[in-house]
Amino acid sequence: MPPPAAPPGPESQRVAAEAAPTAPTAPARPAETPPAGEDEEIIRPSATRLTIARNMTRVAQTVPTAWMVVEVDVTGLVRLRERQRDAFRQREGVDLTYLPFVVQAVTAALREHSMLNSEWRDDQIVLKKRVNMGVAVGVEDGLIVPVIHDADRLSVTGLAHAIDDLATRARARKLKLEDVTGGTFTIDNTGVFGSLVSQPIINPPQAAILSTEAIMKRPVVRDDAIAVRSIMNLCIAFDHRIVDGSHVGPFMQGIKRRLEALAPDSGLT
């Protein structure tokens, strides 16, 4: 009688396991959205809102963001606008807002501090040679950021026209692809809603975004005396992989210096 067969060893067990048919794996079922309760309503986001949600989530998960706020005395700018506004409207056909002055100051500062006009790409910093300014515009279902290409080449008057044109076409859904691509820096005018301090989220893949806050009259100390001045906060969020306080501080001071130098008799160049 032949001896009983030895129990299968590890190798034979492995071969048998590989040879055995495998039951098909059922595909994972996507998580189902719970139905709305009696006191709830489910809203399907628009394509614009879904794009915003995905981009902002990506920034929050992948970009180490830092933040800074600088206080700016814009009393001279306020008086300049008050002096020029009516004549500007009659001459140019568009309103003279504060935003063109801010855009001009920012573009000039970007020329001095080019690291803020860049992006992080594959563990490298890519400096942008053109200054293409994105300006956030509120629309019915979110924000659109049309771009003023080569904004540093425009005067305040030219910027006023460009901003008015892009905002009008954004709200009418008439922007072209080139109007919303190629931006290198973004400004968000949250002050129009009365905001005093905000923390904007970077518009990827740009290095930073600046928010302009509401202009408020405040008592401040000037030459050891208390004076009432028009003050605006500028808030910046920036990608800490690209820049840090040693870059952003001088950049913000450059914007502040330019805005505070404006006076009632300044030109609109």
Image (cartoon, rainbow, N blue to C red):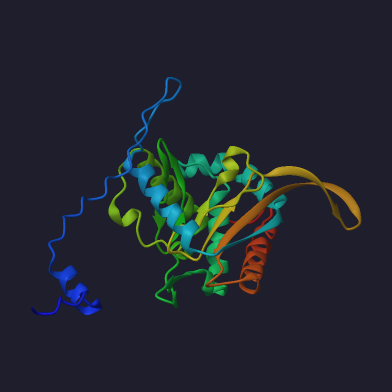
9, 131: nearer the viewer: 9
Q: Is residue 5 above or below residue 236?
A: below
Question: For the point 37% across and 62% down, which residue is it?
Answer: 182
Q: What is the residue that sits farthest to the right in this orientation?
A: 224
Identified at 59% across, 56% down, the residue is 267
Q: Is residue 170 above or below residue 257?
A: above
Q: Is 110 left or right of 215, judged from the image as shown?
A: left
Height in image: 101 above or below 14? above
Across and down, in percent, residue 167 comes to 42, 44
Q: Nearer the viewer, residue 47 or 188?
A: 47
| Residue 215: percent from left, percent from top | 67, 44
The answer to whether residue 268 is visible is no
Describe residue 169's horizontal placement relative to residue 212 as left or right: left
Q: Residue at x 56, y 69 (%)?
A: 240
Q: Position of residue 23 (x, y in %)?
A: 16, 56
Q: Residue at x 57, y 72 (%)?
A: 243
Q: Quadrant of the N terminus?
A: bottom left
